[in-house]
């Protein structure tokens, strides 16, 4: 559990904005979800994201570890067009599903990424191998994939 004591210079800031400033590893959407679910509290109380903080208040964050992805690595064909330490650009072929879902648990781009790349990022507390956006199954094209930095 992390704690932050609100300082004088932080007074009158919105809770979500202050948490974003002080815990930069969290995204805005993750912060919003954590506040709504009561995982981020102000003086041990559940409040709204827009609550204005005051000097001396304590922000507590109870952030769970990332949830493991329920997908297995598979040898799936797709072309890596570009790669550096931060991202991949891949050419997704037509007919390839991006994320595993109820109807397609195997043979997806995510399964292929797990087999080819080891340093993929998670999103909002869920290990989702670097997928920044998606393309429909029947659409081909370039996709960005985020890597851990």
Image: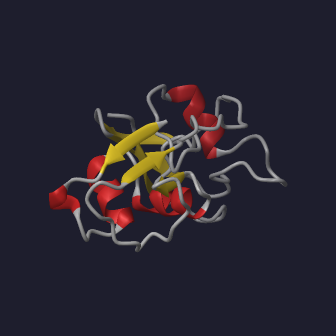
Foreground pick, 106 / 142: 106
Classify the position of the C terminus by image quarter: top left
Q: Nearer the viewer, residue 74 or 10?
A: 10
How many circles with numbers are drawn on the protein? Answer: 0
Please report the residue visible at 33 percent of the width from the left and 69 percent of the height from the top.
Answer: 14
- Image colouring: secondary structure
Residue 78 visible somewhere in the drawing: yes
Q: Is residue 48 above or below residue 70?
A: below
Is there any visible trace of residue 134 in the rendered image? no
Above or below, 130 against 143 in this view is above
* Residue located at (40% from left, 74% from top): 50
Q: Which residue is rendered at x = 34% and y = 42% of the image?
A: 87
Instruction: Report the residue that reaches farthest toward the left.
Output: 9
- Please give the name of the residue rendered at 59% of the width and 44% of the height, measured from the top-left corner: 126
Where 148 falls versus 109 (above or below)? Answer: above
In this rendering, the answer to whether 44 lies above or below 109 is below
Residue 78 percent location from the top left of the image = 54, 41
User: Relative to residue 43, is residue 73 drawn left or right?
Assistant: right
Front-most of residues 47 and 43: 43
Residue 130: image location, x then y, percent: 48, 44
Instruction: Report whether 99 appears left or right of 8.
Output: right
Residue 86 image offset from top left, x and y in percent: 31, 39
Residue 7 place in picture, x, y as percent: 21, 53
> In this image, 10 relative to 114: left or right?
left
- Tell which residue pokes out farthest to the right in this image: 103
């Amino acid at each position: 559990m992390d704690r932050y004591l609100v300082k004088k210079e932080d007074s009158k800031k919105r809770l979500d904005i202050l948490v974003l400033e002080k815990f930069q590893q969290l995204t805005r959407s993750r912060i919003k979800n954590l506040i709504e679910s009561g995982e981020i509290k102000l003086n041990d109380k559940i409040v709204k994201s827009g609550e204005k903080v005051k000097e001396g208040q304590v922000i507590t964050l109870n952030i769970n570890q990332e949830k493991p992805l329920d997908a297995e690595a598979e040898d799936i064909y797709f072309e890596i067009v570009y790669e550096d330490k931060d991202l991949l650009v891949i050419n997704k072929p037509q007919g390839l599903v991006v994320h595993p879902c109820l109807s397609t648990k195997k043979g997806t781009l995510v399964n292929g990424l797990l087999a080819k790349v080891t340093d993929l990022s998670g999103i909002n507390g869920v290990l989702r191998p670097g997928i920044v956006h998606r393309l429909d199954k029947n659409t081909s094209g370039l996709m960005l994939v985020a890597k851990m930095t």
